[in-house]
Image (spheres, rainbow, N blue to C red):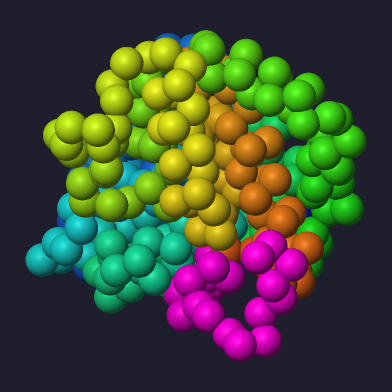
Amino acid sequence: MAELSEAMVQDLIRAEAKKALQTGEVSCVIGWTATRFEDRTKPYFAQTPEECDMLIWNRYCINGTAKFALDDRYPDKKFGIIARGCDTRAINRMIHDKQLKRENLYIIGVVCDGKENPVCRQCAHKTPLVCDVMIGEPVQDVIPESRFQEIEAFEKLSPDERYAYWAKQYDKCIHCYACRNACPACNCIECYADQYRVGWQGKAADREQNQIYGLTRAYHVGDRCIECGECERVCPMHLPIMRQTRKMLKDINDLFGPYECGLSEEETTALGEFKTADPDEFM
């Protein structure tokens, strides 16, 4: 089959979205629309067949769509969502966390050829892992050999050099929680960082409190990260958050073998299940 152009994929997305809304199967369809900037798009909720003409598909459709499904966790009616491979991994993650119900979703899967986002170069799943209708010809999943190259180089630094690097990064953090708000694995109804408990979590934007927040969030996400890179993309201070998370994923792979999260809604997380045969080098 000939490769579909962006315009052809866009037409198919609009057609499938219109069909779902016209039949009354969904209450809205989550996708992307244009902005006044040619190289920027934004999330869009099409609620009528006519509004589907506002949906677009191009190399700037970067925002993850899955997290927006949490705006209506248990709707009375299905809602549609346009999902790439990374978005379907996020959906699987949220279903497994019991934040979404699969029967409430109508997933329009789109085979993605990569976007204007650095994290796309590390993507191993360009074909949606779950969907109700597929747009595009499925491609073979390939985990890039460079997945942990950056981490391997970073691990060669001394402990003092690594600490100095991260101290400098967390000095820049402004405690805005954008990373948490964009992350599909950060899906708790109430985040610990928002709870008011004396001594539980400081709110000051200083190195100590920023490190506590960043490391606590990293361990919370840990083996639940689907490597979409949304945390790093939305950070207004440009913190290399994925370097921190990939270090944890590398350690998990080294300890437990090849591991990726979000490949199915039934999977268990590497750190969420105890086995007597688990390696104990870390103890």
The C terminus - image quarter: bottom right
Q: Quadrant of residue 277?
A: bottom right
Q: Is residue 66 above or below residue 93?
A: above
Residue reaching furthest to the bottom? 276
> x, y percentage for residue 54?
36, 34
Q: Is residue 74 above or below residue 211?
A: below
Q: Is residue 156 magenta?
A: no
For the record, the magenta segment spans 262-283
Q: Quadrant of residue 19?
A: bottom left
> x, y percentage for residue 223?
56, 59
In the image shown, does 141 or 78 lie closer to the viewer?
Answer: 141
Q: Is residue 89 left or right of residue 280?
A: left
- Residue for point 16% across, 63% down: 74
Q: Quadrant of residue 33?
A: top left
- Residue for point 50% across, 38% down: 215
Q: Is residue 267 magenta?
A: yes
Q: Is residue 263 above or below residue 29?
A: below
* Residue 50 appears in the figure: yes
* Residue 141 appears in the figure: no
> x, y percentage for residue 134?
54, 66
Q: Is residue 162 above or below residue 90?
A: above
The N terminus - image quarter: bottom right
Q: Is residue 102 left or right of residue 3?
A: left
Question: Magenta residues: mostly which secondary structure?
Answer: loop
> x, y percentage for residue 13?
46, 51
